[in-house]
Structures are given as C-alpha cells and as structure tokens.
Amino acid sequence: MSGIVDGLLGVPPGLAYALIGLLVFAEAAVFVGFVLPGETAVLLGGAMAATGRLSLLTLAVLVIVAAVAGDSVGFEVGRRFGPRILASKPLQKHAGKIEGAQAQLRKRGGAAVFVARFTAFLRAVMPGLAGASGMPYRRFLVFNAAGGLVWGGGVVLLGYSAGASYATVERALGTGTAVAAAMLVLAVVGVWLWRRHRVDDEVGAQPEG
C-alpha cells in the first residue's frame, strides 16, 4: 500500500506503536474513550501492518496488553473513586448511557464486561463501573482479558485485511482503481463504526430494570 496510507500514517513505526498503545490504554484508564476511541487507531495500525511498516504480531500483542492493562487501571480507579467520578461534569452529560451500563452490569455481571469491549462508550466506562460496583477483580479480569483478546485481535485483523485488499488491488489494477477501492473500504469501515456507535447509544438509552 502506498500513497493514501503513507500520507495519512506517515509516522515512524516506534511512534505509531506508542500512539496506538497509549490510545487503547487511555480509553478506560482515564475515561476518554467516548472522546478519543482507540478502535480507530487500531484499525489504522492494522492497515500499516499490511504495508509491512508494523509487525502484525507485535501490534496485536500491544493492543491486547494495552486494552487489558487500561481496563484494569479503570477498574481500580472506579473502585477507589467511583462516586466522585460519576458526579463529574463530563460524565454527567452521559448519565443516561451510564445508567444503562449499570443496568447491564447488574443484569449480566461479568458478561457485561466482555460485551462492553465492543462498543466505544461502554468500553470506556464499564471497567470503572465494575470497580465501583464491588465486582471481585479476579472475576473482572477473566472477562476483561477475554474481551481484550477477541476485540484486539479482531480489530487489528480487520484493519490488516483492509490494508491488504488495497495493496492487492493496486498491484493488479493500478493506483486509480486502488484509490477507489480504498475509498470504498474506508466507507465500509466508517459505516461499521457508525453502526457500533448506534448500538452503544441504544444500550445507553435502555431504561433500568
């Protein structure tokens, strides 16, 4: 892959790893995932791996470890400071979504932690809510690690597949067709992310009970 991806992602590999890992870690650790979702960074990282600029295995391990570690920090922050954080102005704006997440946590327990990994807002707040709820950390870790493994590996591979498809088209049909294919891929990924956010909104809007 050249041109588009090199232009958008023209950063040194070391910096790319650092930024992707930081964004994934910070999503839940400091409750910024609903502002700066790490999922987009992981998708772009997967596309970079398809060019050979990043190692697919290294990226996948980095993303999974950062996801599990960030969620663990978020869990501890929620355990210690849950009520204070929930009362903060940024989270009060999302009170309806948080109530929906709390309802899911009460209803499904650890399974809610696993499912939350796949929607942006819940991915950011569920670890803290689990900590504040008094869930044992060992139980949280099992579902958190499972979710991080499936989500991290899956999103990296999705980005890698999109990047590999672009490179294949470019070699076979030329740059012009490859650009059109890339735009189609970006549109598909964009719709996929939008649908995920719609699901997140619907979950957050569910009434308790």
Image (spheres, rainbow, N blue to C red):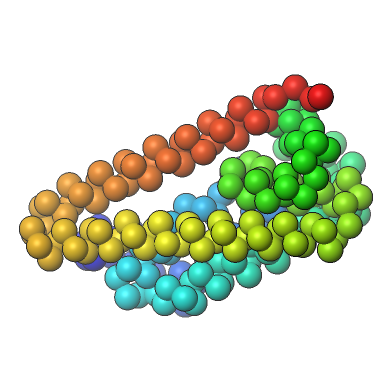
Q: Residue furthest left?
A: 173
Quarter holding the C terminus is top right
Estimate the x, y position of residue 82 in percent, counting from the top left: 87, 46
Q: Is residue 184 visible?
A: yes
| Vertical relation: 137 (above or below) 193 | below
Residue found at x 47% / y 35%: 195
How many numbered circles are shown?
Answer: 0
- As rendered, which of 90 and 133 lies closer to the eye? 133
Quadrant of the image occupied by residue 178: bottom left
Estimate the x, y position of residue 55 in percent, counting from the top left: 42, 77
83 displayed left or right of 65: right
Residue found at x 54% / y 36%: 197
122 displayed left or right of 18: right
Quadrant of the image occupied by residue 62: bottom right
Q: Residue furthest top?
A: 207
Residue found at x 65% / y 46%: 115
Quarter holding the N terminus is bottom left
Q: Is residue 15 visible?
A: no
68 displayed left or right of 140: left
| Vertical relation: 26 (above or below) 53 | above
15 displayed left or right of 88: left
- As rendered, which of 48 and 116 lies closer to the eye? 116
Estimate the x, y position of residue 152 in percent, counting from the top left: 54, 61
- As rendered, which of 27 and 106 lies closer to the eye? 106
| Vertical relation: 94 (above or below) 36 | above
Residue found at x 57% / y 59%: 150
Estimate the x, y position of residue 171 in percent, counting from the top left: 12, 65
